Image: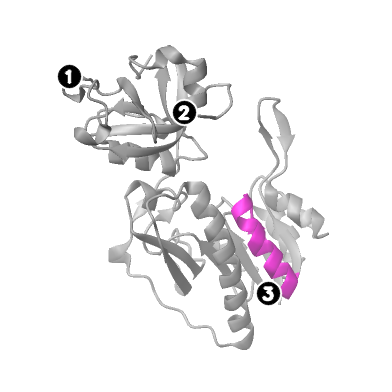
Amino acid sequence: MKVLFAGTPQIAVPSLEIVAQNHEVVGVLTNPDRIRGRGRKTAPPPVKIKAQELNLPVFQFASLKSEARECIGKLGADIMVVFAYGRIFGPKFLALFPFGGINIHPSLLPLYRGSVPLVAPLLNGDLKTGVSVQRIALELDSGDILLQESFPLTQHESADDLAERSALMGAEMIRKVLAKIEQGKVQSKPQDPDMATYCRRMRKEDGHINWRLPAAMIERMVRAYNPWPKAYSYWNGTQLSILKSCVRLTGNDIGDPGIDTAKSRPGEVLGVDRKNGILIQTGEGLLCAEQLQLQGKKVLFWKDFLNGNRDLIGSQLGDD
């Protein structure tokens, strides 16, 4: 089949590679280059980089209006394959493809329709998640399911970990689905709209830690918001991000009789657990910060961080 592939971030790259190995990719649709990093340099999206390595034509439209439809229509694609492209397709655009469009979505649809399906299961403490391949419908992530596979969560994964696993799983799943479509053997299953849940686009402020929350919830934030926007607080007027952490109960498991959790305030840095990190009081339990990063500085293991910031112990974290 002739395929138009649409995607933007790194999670979509393995799928582009496997589609290109098995089908004729007549074009790759991705978002325009963006200004990134401290140097404010223009950088291409990962899908564009891989498409150029594969000598595939790349299209980066600011919108999918008449000019884009005319250009894509000339390619003669039979089907469109989408993974994290980042834009909505209208009926006129979808009509360009005789076999329609199919989308790889890293959640167990109808759960977590929307733009951040990797973050939501971590924040909610789910025991499993997965990847769905669905037909593209006009309503967001509501199309019939063509293939769905799940995997367990260990409660230690970050969003980056889920992205890597979903990328590889999605690539193998799209290979299977395209083969079945080509053979005329694909089967579809409608989603149950009553079971649908939604997740909105992330904002930087979502990572701002409220120390009155339970330690278990903050630990899930640390994992869910890594690599962006990172779970963060403020210390002496500077943003302090926590990139890895674990939970400790209050009481004897701390192993330090000099630490009095009964009189401490949420956000107060109480001391250290020599095995797991810097102890911070929360609304319920203690958070052990294992990896930390001051704004503009390197990510450091907690011992290295304390070597350069000894006055952290006994201080108060929070808004500035």
From mark 1 to mark 2, how far is it between C-alphas?
Answer: 24 Å
Q: Are marks 1 and 2 in contact (CB under 8 Å)?
A: no
At label 2, which amino acid type do we have? Trp
- Let me know if residue 247 appears in the view: yes
Q: Amino acid at mark 3?
A: Asp
Q: Which residues are magenta?
A: 5-24
Residue ID for mark 3: 78
Pick whichever of labels 1 and 2 is earlier in the sequence: 1
Please state which amino acid type lies under the numbered disc 1. Answer: Lys
Name the residue rendered at 60%, 66% in the picture. Answer: 171
Q: Is residue 45 shown left or right of residue 188?
A: right
Which SS class for mark 2? helix
Judge left or right: residue 53 versus residue 149.
right
> 244 or 42: nearer the eye?
244
Mark 2, Cα crowd under 10 Å, few <14 / some 14-19 / many 20+, is many
Which residue is label 1 attached to? 263
Name the secondary structure under disc 3.
loop
